[in-house]
Image (spheres, grey):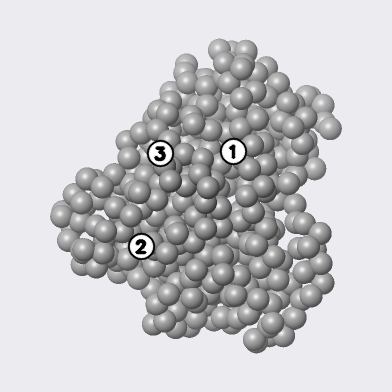
Amino acid sequence: MTTEKQRNKFIIDAGYNTFLLRSEDVYIDLLTDSGTSAMSDRQWAAIMMGDEAYAGSRNYYNLEAAVTKFYGYKYTLPTHQGRGAEHIISQILIKPGDIIPGNMYFTTTRLHQEIAGGTFVDVIIDEAHDPESLHPFKGNIDIDKLSAVIKKYGAKKIPYVTVSTSVNMAGGQPLSIANLKEVRKLTQKHGIRLVHDMTRVAENAYFIQQREPGYKTKSIAKIILEICALTDIATMSAKKDALVNIGGILAMNDVKIYAEAQNLAVVYEGLHTYGGLAGRDMEAMAVGISESVQDLHIRARIGQVEYLGEKLKERGIPTVLPFGGHGIFLNAAKILSHLPQEQFPGQTLAAEIYKDSGVRSMERGIVSAGRDKKGKNIFPKLELVRLTIPRRVYTQAHMDVVAESVERVFLRREKIKGLTMVFEPEYLRFFQARFKQ
Ligand SMILES: Cc1ncc(COP(=O)(O)O)c(C=O)c1O
């Protein structure tokens, strides 16, 4: 617990960037669900089973078996986290001048595509950019948009299409199996691969079970396998669904690409049987994957997110709808409608919530979107603040505290002043940029 006076100082010292706060100065930490979940007793027991051999650790083979059993991919390369997998696959498949269509950008994914010389093109359905659209599958790809991109650039210039399950930047919104099947049909016709960002595939599977005709009685585990079978390669930040504090996965069925990935791993991550992780971390990940596909776990996890969403809705606070899988996204553009996007409404709102109660959230708007290749600011339609909920960590009572704090800020919203950016790092600026009021 800190006082308001202390928090006013801490946020100025942090340049109004919640990433630059010290965690001991945070009361309830909803910055991210990445690596912040609680490991289970079974996972901690697995930590004690670490085989720390440099090569061929038993834990690697257990992880590989878990990936094949629960995700269906044949070959597994561990990486230090999700962006390690994105780096390797981008370097292998993308040539300068290539185009990579996908269902909304993700910060690290797009950056690795650009570093490899590619250009990301957004082909998500329009509803995803509208916070109030109640479309049940706002993560879907717009087939017409994708066809137009293939027609415009030609299949040879498109090494793959990225399909993300539970689209983070859209507010944790799912894609449907029906849509994925259509995407698969179209891309197969043109010989284009699908690379699946399966960071939150279990959460997406829950929404399919709840909302897609024909899936009510299928288990989360079965739905996950069905999704993965429609794709060729997967990248994953295991710090989310897979319930570990660190780790990532690059998985696939193509043995030739796997051989190239194994080779690049020794340059950037570590030998292909540990990829920058300790043996114990791989063992905890293998157990975490098996826990993450359990229906009751996912229902409780998404149920808690919904609980917070309902509390905010009762208070009339605008959020992205329907509520997403890993957090509630506040509509900062609407809450601080008196601030132009150049004054960073999302960044401002996150700082104000911290000042009010010590609850830490993060911006997902113009700061996260960054600049285009010409150096111009990208103005995304979504200007949001993410209240991201770690798994198995907080109680509903914590969620009540969060809702009450957001309400207090909401009630004094008209008096809130915007920010100006005083330091901008070159890459992924949202992590380290600094601001002044
Ligand atoms: C959808 C998605 N893809 C990739 C990543 C990158 O993973 P990592 O942070 O483990 O590098 C994240 C992390 O937030 C993510 O949410």
Per the rendering, the mark at residue 138 is 3
Give the x, y percent position of residue 141.
Answer: 33, 47
Q: Amino acid at mark 1?
A: Gly
Say which element carries label 1.
strand
Quarter residue 159 falls in: bottom left
Q: Going 75% across and 56% down the picture, which residue do you hit?
A: 39
Name the quarter where the N terminus is drawn. top right
Q: Going 40% across and 39% down the picture, which residue do you hit?
A: 138
Q: Going 47% across and 47% down the picture, which residue do you hit?
A: 215
Name the quarter where the C terminus is drawn. top right
Say which residue label 1 marks.
327
Distance between mark 1 and mark 2 Cα atoms: 26 Å
Distance between mark 3 and mark 2 Cα atoms: 19 Å
* Label 1 crowd (10 A; few <14 / some 14-19 / many >=20): many
Q: Are marks 3 and 1 in contact (CB under 8 Å)?
A: no
First along the sequence among labels 3 and 1: 3
